[in-house]
């Protein structure tokens, strides 16, 4: 009180100026009509990339990805929120550290991206349980329905998440523009549930339009979309025209449809809620093959086609960046550790060829506001090409799609605005051509080059047009009087007739033409190829747009007092140029000498990244474990497994129920110890385990290793329906069991994450994990079970399973391994740990992305769980997937400091050891500042 009075007195005396109240964030209105979304009444073409923060456990790197998406012309990200990632147990929620979604939404705001928020509760996404926490399996009431038990559970999730989303809405000055309820719910019909999701959101203050993403066949559900309970405002549609057949990338072409997003409601814009931008690797072909499957030609042909054929004005490309199923995040039946997805930005955060096709399309979409309101119009017919067109009814601007459905190039003539102009398309090429397009002070009559972008910089209009290398192009502009045309670079011919200036050229390199006079403000036309066009970066500063060419990324820019300051990345030393109303250039805070070129740009040179030297990993120490396999092990504090029923549709194959979820163990490895009195006549141990694909289990009897078997998947997908999933029969060695003596069976089950609920069918989602049947003669067995000992506060509930080493901290950096012997070249059957420390001192001001790489053949029956500084960065092994590179996210990786690798090897038989080494996946000068992700060193 005294302090307050003192401050008050000082304020009155004029000695202390009260801090101004933080300026209220500007609030906006979000509306829509049949054509598009609108913010403050202005039409928006929404171009989103899907991003899963939970697949990148280094929050500073969220900014890296979002800036890269923004630099490709995206103006939005679409984000699933995984319930499982935030809730390790009923009633327990965590939104801190790598789960700090408030921070994610702030970064989106700062980056200038809208957010399509997708809180589920069900999200699919090839993530464990499809986003459902595994504890939900033990909650009564059908999931994805209005059943009371499920309803109470998801109300709790949304009660935690909705307030965060609500305060970040565009309507409150934030980034959340759309709210997506459920996921591909078309297969179900519970309108009460769909309505409750929306009512719950509205009650929490969600006031932006609500959408949902429909799939496959709208079916009966779509009939309620127009009106009635459950109907959303803006229905979206998912399209994956190219399938997931990555192994046949060279020959697959659109097996899953034309990829034209259907219109669902007349009063809402067409919304491509998920449009295929990569693929899951169902056949273990590797993600490079998935990137080929959905490469540049696919991206041109299908996406540009969809823009014109569907008239959609809102798009979300799945995925923009896939990331990593670190820990036990993977839904194991469809994916392994990497969720690279063959996306435009790869798992190690590098930009791929496809990124630059997104950039060409993204820049175009943002440069043509006329596209936000169009109707179908008559398209010119072109021999050998598919055509379609849309026209803006207010401006008359026409968008003409020309596509080559064949695989051989086509050169043809197209009639645009009454002019016969040459157009050339490569196999599976596609262009969106413009007629009657006003930009700056210019009027484009027609062009057979595509527009990359247009801007007004320093009193001059600039247009960048492009076409396939070596093809002919023509651009016609209208001028009241003959203008002066100066070809600054390249070969371009011009002619003026009847108010029209026509330029003819072959797309090659980068031609530069300066047009002045003729009654307009000067125009710099840059005529490029796909590659030279994509080398331009655009950033819209409050002082107007700027263009940069020659850097490997432009993250942001400001212009003030004659200086343009860029945040840019370079992968090699080289020249760059800037077009900005400025005379001085700063790059990453350093002044760069420049000269002015004939086209009025500032040109200079930038340094590249410094060399990176990596330590070799050769200090491995090794320690065997699995005391649980020994008869004398004390399991008295383990959980007694004695339940007789479960909510799973899977009928236990023996009693008691051994499903690990029933006892609260949901993640990774689970141990069982079964005690029984032997008769001496037991011949076999018969077991069944369900682990999800890629799992296995190892069996010991009285300390003797009996062998291993593959875990089963689930009853309804094992073809033909397998009455005995994950079966293993193990011979009891003669003399091991004696009549009347107690014996112990130890089983280590490697669970692999949980089935999804794509079909909204409890059958699949509630499939158990762990042992589902156990028989040794006729003995009654007393069971105890042990899984994850404790939830790691920073790394979360999906990081660790229940291996002895995990329960006692062997995976953590602080564990004292100095007494462990040096690693040998072999491991016995069972569990063995390897540890090594290494120091890194990566160059500052540089973004170096590292991975662990395994070379050579993977030993059979061998799996390794990889921990970097205690973070489970993946699982390696032939039974797991084709992956041999494991990306180490900076932040989890200490770029300047000591790092600890711990590897838990689970070997089904004695094996040679596979140890990884470090590799550089990419290194650029620039990047974003990345701090080490805080996490404890000890249990
Ligand atoms: C969609 C689903 C996404 C993801 C995708 C395939 O059907 O909505 O969550 O699973 O398929 O990667």
Image (cartoon, helix red, strand yellow):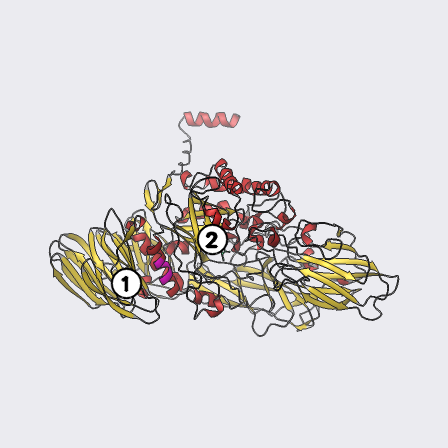
| Number of other residues with Cα within 10 Å of mark 2, as a class: few under 14, some 14 to 19, many 20 or more | some
Q: Quadrant of residue 746?
A: bottom right
Q: CA distance from mark 2 to mark 1?
A: 35 Å
Disc 2, disc 1: CB below 8 Å? no
Q: Secondary structure at mark 2?
A: loop
According to the image, label 1 marks what residue?
466
Q: Which residues are magenta?
A: 300-305
Q: Position of residue 301 (x, y in %)?
A: 36, 62
Q: Is residue 301 magenta?
A: yes
Seen at 38% across and 62% down, the residue is: 299
Q: Callout 1: helix, strand or loop?
A: strand
Image-based side of 221 in relation to 551, left or right: right
Q: Is residue 510 visible?
A: yes
The answer to whether residue 183 is visible is no
State the image coordinates of residue 334 (x, y, percent, origin top left).
55, 61
Q: Please say whether residue 354 is one of the residues in the magenta stretch.
A: no
Q: Which residue is mark 2?
A: 215
Q: In this rendering, would 295 be left or right of 408?
A: right
Mark 2 close to ligand 1, CB under 8 Å = yes
Residue 607 horizontal/vertical position (percent):
37, 64
Q: How many marks?
A: 2
Q: Nearer the viewer, mark 2 or mark 1?
A: 2
Q: Quadrant of residue 674?
A: bottom right
């Amino acid at each position: 009180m005294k302090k307050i009075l003192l401050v008050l007195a000082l304020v009155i005396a004029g000695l202390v100026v009260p801090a101004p109240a933080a300026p209220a964030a500007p609030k906006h209105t979000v509306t829509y009509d049949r054509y598009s979304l609108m913010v403050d009444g202005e039409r928006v073409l929404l171009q989103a990339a899907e991003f899963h923060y939970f697949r990148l456990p280094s929050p500073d790197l969220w900014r890296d990805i979002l800036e890269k998406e923004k630099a490709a012309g995206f103006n939005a990200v679409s984000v699933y929120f995984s319930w499982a990632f935030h809730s390790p147990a009923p009633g327990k929620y965590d939104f801190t550290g790598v789960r700090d979604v408030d921070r994610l939404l702030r970064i989106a705001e700062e980056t200038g991206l809208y957010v399509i928020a997708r809180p589920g509760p069900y999200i699919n996404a090839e993530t464990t349980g499809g986003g459902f926490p595994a504890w939900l399996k033990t909650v009564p009431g059908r999931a994805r329905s209005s059943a009371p038990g499920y309803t109470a559970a998801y109300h709790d999730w949304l009660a935690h998440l909705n307030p965060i989303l609500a305060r970040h809405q565009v309507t409150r000055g934030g980034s959340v523009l759309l709210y997506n309820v459920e996921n591909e719910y078309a297969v179900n019909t519970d309108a009460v549930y769909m309505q409750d999701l929306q009512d719950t959101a509205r009650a929490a203050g969600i006031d932006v339009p609500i959408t949902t993403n429909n799939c496959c066949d709208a079916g009966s559900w779509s009939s309620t979309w127009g009106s009635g309970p459950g109907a959303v405002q803006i229905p979206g549609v998912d399209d994956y025209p190219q399938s997931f057949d990555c192994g046949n990338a060279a020959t697959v072409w659109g097996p899953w449809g034309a990829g034209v997003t259907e219109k669902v409601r007349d009063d809402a814009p067409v919304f491509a809620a998920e449009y295929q931008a990569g693929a899951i690797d169902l056949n273990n072909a590797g993600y490079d093959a998935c990137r080929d499957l959905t490469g540049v030609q696919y991206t041109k042909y299908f996406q540009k086609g969809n823009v014109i054929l569907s008239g959609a004005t809102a798009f979300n490309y799945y995925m923009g960046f896939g990331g990593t199923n670190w820990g036990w995040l993977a839904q194991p039946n469809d994916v392994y550790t990497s969720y690279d997805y063959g996306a435009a930005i790869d798992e190690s955060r590098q930009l791929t060829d496809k990124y630059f096709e997104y950039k060409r399309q993204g820049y175009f979409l943002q440069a043509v506001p006329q596209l936000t309101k169009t109707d179908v119009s008559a398209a010119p017919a072109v021999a050998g090409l598919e055509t379609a067109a849309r026209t803006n009814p207010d401006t008359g601007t026409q968008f003409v799609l020309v596509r080559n459905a064949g695989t051989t190039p086509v050169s043809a003539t197209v009639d645009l605005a009454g002019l016969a102009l040459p157009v050339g398309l490569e196999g599976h090429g596609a262009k969106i051509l413009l007629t009657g397009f006003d930009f700056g002070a210019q009027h484009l009559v027609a062009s057979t080059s595509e527009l990359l972008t247009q801007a007004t910089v320093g009193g001059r209009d600039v247009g960048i047009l492009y076409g396939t290398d070596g093809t002919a192009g023509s651009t016609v502009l209208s001028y009241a009087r003959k203008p002066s045309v100066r070809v600054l670079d390249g070969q371009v011919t011009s002619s003026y007739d009847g108010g029209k200036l026509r330029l003819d050229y072959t797309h090659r390199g980068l031609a530069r033409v300066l047009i002045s006079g003729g009654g307009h403000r000067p125009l710099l036309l840059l005529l490029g190829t796909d590659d030279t066009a994509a080398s331009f970066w655009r950033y819209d500063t409050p002082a107007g747009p700027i263009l940069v060419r020659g850097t490997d990324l432009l993250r942001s820019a400001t212009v003030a007092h004659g200086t343009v300051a860029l945040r840019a990345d370079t992968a090699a030393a080289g020249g760059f140029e800037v077009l900005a109303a400025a005379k001085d250039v700063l790059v990453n805070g350093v002044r760069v000498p420049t000269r002015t070129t004939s086209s009025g740009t500032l040109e200079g040179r930038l340094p590249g990244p410094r060399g990176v030297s990596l330590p070799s990993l050769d200090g491995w120490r090794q320690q065997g474990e699995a005391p649980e396999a020994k008869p004398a092990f004390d399991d008295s504090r383990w959980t007694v497994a004695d339940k007789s029923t479960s909510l799973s549709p899977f009928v236990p194959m023996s009693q008691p129920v051994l499903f690990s979820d029933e006892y609260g163990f949901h993640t990774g490895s689970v141990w069982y110890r079964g005690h029984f009195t032997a008769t001496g006549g037991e011949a076999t141990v018969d077991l069944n385990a369900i682990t999800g694909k890629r799992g296995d289990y190892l069996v010991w009897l009285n300390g003797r290793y009996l062998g291993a078997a593959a875990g089963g998947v689930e009853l309804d997908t094992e073809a033909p329906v397998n009455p005995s999933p994950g079966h293993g029969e193990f011979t009891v060695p003669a003399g091991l069991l004696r009549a009347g003596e107690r014996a112990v069976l130890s089983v280590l089950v490697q669970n692999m994450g949980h089935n999804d609920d794509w079909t909204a069918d409890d059958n699949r989602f509630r499939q158990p994990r762990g042992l589902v049947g156990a028989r040794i003669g006729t003995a009654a067995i007393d069971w105890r079970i042990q899984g994850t000992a404790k939830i790691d506060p920073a790394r979360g509930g999906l990081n660790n399973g229940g291996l002895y080493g995990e329960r006692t901290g062997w995976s953590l950096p602080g564990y004292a391994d100095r007494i462990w012997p040096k690693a040998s070249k072999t491991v016995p059957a069972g569990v063995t740990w390897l540890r090594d420390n290494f120091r890194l001192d990566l160059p500052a001001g540089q973004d170096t992305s590292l991975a662990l790489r395994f070379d050579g053949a993977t030993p059979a029956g061998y799996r390794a769980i990889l921990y970097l500084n205690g973070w489970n960065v993946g699982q390696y092994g032939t039974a797991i997937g084709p992956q041999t590179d494991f990306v180490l996210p900076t932040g989890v990786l200490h770029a300047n400091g000591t790092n600890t690798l711990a590897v838990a090897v689970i070997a089904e038989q004695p094996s040679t050891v596979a140890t990884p080494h470090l590799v550089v996946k990419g290194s650029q000068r620039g990047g974003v500042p990345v701090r080490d992700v805080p996490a404890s060193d000890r249990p």
